[in-house]
Amino acid sequence: MRNLFQVSAAFEDIMPAEYKSLIENGPFGGDKGVTDLGTFKELLEEHPLCAGCGLALSLRLILASLPNPEHTIIVGSTGCSALAFPQAAVHNIHSLFGNQNAVASGLKRALSLRFPDVVKDVVVIAGDGATADIGLDMVMHSWFRQERITTIMLDNEAYANTGGQESGMSQEGAVLNMAPKGKNFSKISVPELAWASGCAYVAAVTPANPRKLQSAVRRGILAARETGSSYIQVYSPCPTNYKFKPNQTIEKVKSREKDGTYQVREYISDEAQLLFDRLEEVKNG
């Protein structure tokens, strides 16, 4: 697998040290994960996002959880995460706001034709505005069609990069910079929408439990390879717009889990469960 990333001898003397380090000690072709963080060259090491950004932490964990980063293409959309992807050492596409699942659907089909003998994982990573508001129609129709892609929502409960407007994922009553009177309706139950729309695997997780997040990401991608669409929602609180200290992000996550206002949950179809059981048997010999 590492032959995919060998540097031509003719270019070794001009390749950046960062690139060489990624090839020599990166996650490509290995079985690295969140428990190995700090021991290998990561796909995302620097970003321009705010201090304490829950989205940046979640993105770091997601990228460390990819089962085959060397064969993964990420489709993103307008939002805070779009500022980080130019620094990520993984193939990625920036789509128009809200059409990321349409782009990902076409990309997955094209890759299946172009590389019939290689599994190419197409993973959508976008915020709540692109996923649950402006792009909800294209997101849900990709689920209806059972497109074999994984959709990951970075749920910071606001339009964070445009001033802090409320989104469909903001909690009822949430007061934000551009929602001074508080939100008038409940947070959208997207995991339940995804499950009702036919996704084979659905999970809602947080960065406070990296191993559970990793399990969800890997299960979602594996399910999408063989059984249909999958959806993962990651609570990624925003200290800038929700006015808490940057070092309180994980504390904020844990408090939301404890009081039940963010529920970690998982839905698995019978077909996906059979797949997971089979893969576990293979792994254990």
Image (cartoon, rainbow, N blue to C red):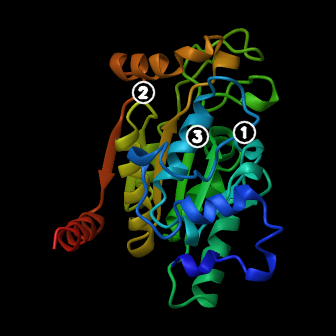
- Tell me the CA gap for discs 3 and 1: 16 Å
Decide which of 73, 22 is in the foreground and name it: 22
Residue at x 41% of width, y 16% of height: 255
Residue 134, located in which quarter of the rendered image?
Answer: top right
Q: Nearer the viewer, mark 2 or mark 3?
A: 3
User: Residue at the front extreme?
Assistant: 13
Look at label 2 and name its amino acid.
Tyr
In the drawing, what numbered circle is on residue 262? 2
Mark closer to the chain start, 2 or 1? 1
Q: Nearer the viewer, mark 3 or mark 1?
A: 1
Q: Position of residue 112 (x, y in %)?
A: 57, 84
Task: Confirm or deny contact between disc 2 and disc 3 (CB under 8 A).
Answer: no
Task: Confirm or deny contact between disc 2 and disc 1 (CB under 8 A).
Answer: no
Residue at x 83% of width, y 68% of height: 14
Residue 230, located in which quarter of the rendered image?
Answer: bottom left
In the drawing, what numbered circle is on residue 281? none
| Residue 123 visible in this rendered orientation of the protein | yes
Give above or below for 18 relative to 229. above
Tell me the SS state at disc 2: loop
From the viewer's perspective, tell me whether residue 272 is left or right of residue 91: left
In the drawing, what numbered circle is on residue 154? 3
Decide which of 38, 230 is in the foreground and name it: 38
Tell me the SS state at disc 1: loop
From the viewer's perspective, tell me whether residue 154 is left or right of residue 266: right
Give above or below for 234 relative to 119. above
Q: Nearer the viewer, mark 2 or mark 1?
A: 1
- Tell me the CA gap for discs 2 and 3: 13 Å
Location of the C terminus by quadrant is bottom left
